Image (cartoon, helix red, strand yellow):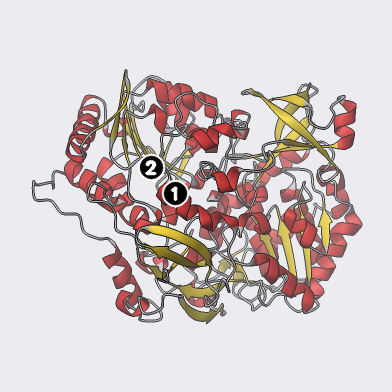
Amino acid sequence: MNPSIHYRACNLCEAICGLEIKYEGNQVISIAGDKNDQFSRGHVCPKAVALKDIYEDPNRLRQPVRRTEKGWETISWQEAFDEVASKLKVIQAQHSTNAVAMYAGNPSVHNSGTFLAGTGLMRALKTKNIFSATSTDQLPHHFAAWQMFGHPFLLPIPDIDHTDFWLIMGGNPIASNGSLMTVPDVANRLKAIQQRGGKVVVIDPRFTETAAKADEHHFIRPATDVFLLLAMLHVVFAEGLDKSPDDVTGLEALKEIVAEFSPEKVEDQTGIKADTIRHIVHEFTSAKSAVAYGRIGISTQAFGGACQWLLNAFNVVTGNMDKVGGAMFTQPAMDILSTSKGVYDKYNRYQSRVRGLPEFMGELPVSALAEEILTEGEGQIKALITSCGNPILSTPNGRQLDVAFEKLEFMVSVDIYINETTRHAHLILPPATGLEVSHYDLTFNALAVRNVTRFSEPLFPKSDEAKYDWEIFQELTARLTGEYTTDFQAQDPHAKVDMGLRFGAYKLNLDELRKYPHGMDLGPLKSCLFNRLQTIDKKIHLAPDLLLKDVVRIHKTFNNTKLSADFDLLLINRRHLRDNNSWMHNSERLIKGRNRCTLLIHSQDAAQRKIEEGTMVKIRSRVGEVLVSAKLTDKMMRGVVCLPHGYGHDRAGVQLPIAQAHAGVSVNDLTDELILDELTGNAVFGGVPVQVYC
């Protein structure tokens, strides 16, 4: 008997590769790339096979559990919902609505059920204390898009399938499969640029996997990309290379800002020679088409917002914004921008209680979460809901969060594992997941390098005892709003997808989309920005007021970049192809092999400290210290060291045996919650001052 075949998109990372899954009964036989998927073209990375591991994982929770003095006990859904709703209501009645907080993790956008239903629970809580993984890595993108184009989700995408010059700053798409750039099979797409006579240049403090495939790589001192971008713009204007479109404002103000940042002036700060900066700009501007792309490395630093602003401005003034082969914009089948009413204005309407950090897009910076729990007084957080997130490993100063979560009166987690974060919860509510759920990529279709769409049907039915994520969120919402009755039935939120498709640019619907198990190719990116601009004057704003004000901070930092004698190295982080933050480490096939949680250090920096290959070294920052094995390499810039993120599974109470066997250390036991991008509130993970010693 031949196995049956199921087609769906992999929702474990942003690449949304098409999968061909062979199965018999409720057993997965194999998972491979779908060769008929026109977007991923049969490509698949090692993470896809972990869908089988998650589905079969004996450590995955399948029913609600309660933490007791004797350990975790299984309880009924009714009992769990009763306790969650009653506890949250009592805490808000005794203190205030803001006494309850909610944190949404990265997997929220990888599951359309959570994405569509989770926001209803946030609204029902009526709290200002909403946090998410967004403020750990991507707020600068949204902030710059909002200021320049009028909406935080009007994000430019590199048209790499048609470009002749791809400049990558602080990104490693071969390891990440793209990030805020949905691009399966990126290695072959990169190779195609070179085969048609184009060029790929990488700027990064580490010689990354992507740099190894590029034509050029240049080391840059961490957290100085803002100075490099200012110098690149200086060259454009000083040498008459400006090709700005007519529909822009602030061009003269931008010229004035960059005028004093010549390549010679920024050499010492960036570590990149003036001639090299000019060479990059000359090649970029002389290419038939070109695009600059910057990701984690330039977002998770003290000037993340300014970096994304200047990067966008560089694409605009060189004539490569909204141009084939440049930075373009998708026309997704379901367009979340279509739901916007007028100009988007959700910034600094309120501030965090302790540090006065600004709200953006209805969220406060997650770097403030611990202090909002630990600092007593009116408005103190007393209860927390986490949704598929692991902030103890993914946000700054995780050890402080450990302490903070122990102080909570009540904590509930919607999650399938007892991990470093959820071990603090009083109740865990596990949703059906992965191969058991329907999925539509609301976010990643809107970030794709080609216009595509697909609806993934569930492969296996959930068990009778299980609940979908949207059932959990909708019932909690109903109970908190007083709309709950004994005959309450949650409604599949994918009806919203059907409506969005019907009103979208292609006039599709779910029934039609279901006929295309390999997905629908809606064509290459096309110029569309000036039809989609959300600014009042329908122009690109090159010098927005909020970003102009941040130039004062840039000047101040430019004159004060020296490290202290105590912390004389700069720490950055990295990602491996088989890692997906912290949430894939209980899969033996992904975590096995050589130890990936090592400190990369330049061989000369190691020699100065008498560190040899494999030496166990201590890394110390202002907030903590970890012990890890050193790996000597010349693929690091001098003065820079690198740890992977997502590790640190050595906490007591975690019930992930495979992950704990490969525990590693958490880079976020070193990152500092007090250092962040003051403009956007994004956390800083790049360029953290540390000391390394035996």
Position of residue 82 relative to residue 567, above or below, is below
475 and 351: which is toward the camera: 475
Q: Amino acid at mark 2?
A: Ile
Q: Earlier in the sequence, mark 2 or mark 1?
A: 1
Residue labelled with disc 2: 416
Where disc 2 sits, the SS reads loop
- Which of these two is toward me, 582 or 157? 582
- Badge 1 crowding class, 10 Å Cα cut-off, few under 14, some 14 to 19, many 20 or more, is some
Q: Tell whether 52 sits left or right of 44.
A: left
Question: Mark 2 touching mark 1, by CB under 8 A?
Answer: yes
Q: Position of residue 43 (x, y in %)?
A: 59, 68
Quadrant into which the C terminus falls: top right
**Relative to 356, residue 220 above or below:** below
- Classify residue 610 by image quadrant: top right
Where's residue 131, x and y in %?
42, 41
| Residue 616 showing in the rendered view | yes
Q: Which element is circle 1 on?
A: helix
Decide which of 246, 197 is in the foreground and name it.
197
* Closer-to-camera residue (147/384): 384
Residue 81's image quarter? top left
- Between the residue at mark 2 and the residue at mark 1, the CA separation in whole angstroms equals 9 Å
Q: Which residue is mark 1?
A: 54
Q: Amino acid at mark 1?
A: Ile
